[in-house]
Image: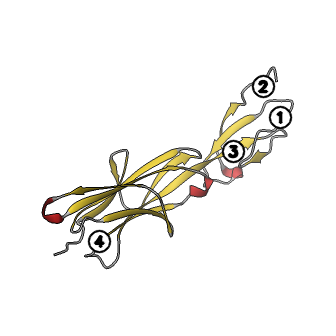
Amino acid sequence: MVFKPQYVKVTREGIELQNSTLIGPFSEGDDLALTCESGGGKPTPVVAWYNGSQKLSGDYLTEPGSNGAGTGRNSVRLTLSRGDLGAKYECRATNDALESPMVAAVEVDVNEVWRRCCGGSLIATGCLEPGPGPGHLASANARATPSHASFSTGSRPSQEGQ
């Protein structure tokens, strides 16, 4: 006898996230750890992470339950980049009792790092240009356009003695 899983859920740092929720904002380079869990199914659900159609490598564990039912968990750790803005990470749980996977998903918001170069122009990515005058680093919400973004700035580290 086979049973459909009773649930599929996504957690971050032990806190359950609502399905199809937007999480963040994160900054480029941040690590994001997500865990997906599905339980109550017989056989134990197979749980996998996807970014679109691409299956992600994760740590998959199973926990046997009573009467052959069990829980499947899959954890992924992602280093976020600009390309992750708006990315939808899906957890798909399958077992023999399901015609199609049970799905839980999150969408990621990633802030882009903006840099003020010499001459005062903004660039979205790249390096600070060397030269006279202070350089500035700025961070803006990635959904904003440069002309409508609010910035917090800081001085470039000193390059004395170089």
Residue 128, x across and y down, in percent: 77, 38
The quarter of the picture where residue 132 lies is top right
Q: Residue at x 53, y 60 (%)?
A: 87
First-in-chain label (3 vs 4): 4
Q: Is residue 69 left or right of residue 155?
A: left
Quadrant showing the C terminus: top right
Mark 4 neighbour density, 10 Å: few (under 14) some (14–19) many (20 or more): many
| Disc 4, SS | loop
For the residues marked 4 and 2, what is the alpha-carbon distance in whole angstroms?
59 Å
Mark 3 neighbour density, 10 Å: few (under 14) some (14–19) many (20 or more): many
10 and 39: which is toward the camera: 39
Q: Residue at x 13, y 60 (%)?
A: 66
Q: Is residue 147 above or below residue 101?
A: above
133 and 15: which is toward the camera: 15
Kind of residue indicated by mark 3: Trp
First-in-chain label (3 vs 2): 3
Q: Pointer 1: what residue? A: 130
Q: Pointer 4: what residue? A: 95
Q: Are marks 1 and 2 in contact (CB under 8 Å)?
A: yes
95 and 34: which is toward the camera: 95
Q: Residue furthest bottom?
A: 99
First-in-chain label (1 vs 3): 3
For the residues marked 1 and 3, what is the alpha-carbon distance in whole angstroms?
16 Å
The label shown at residue 107 is none
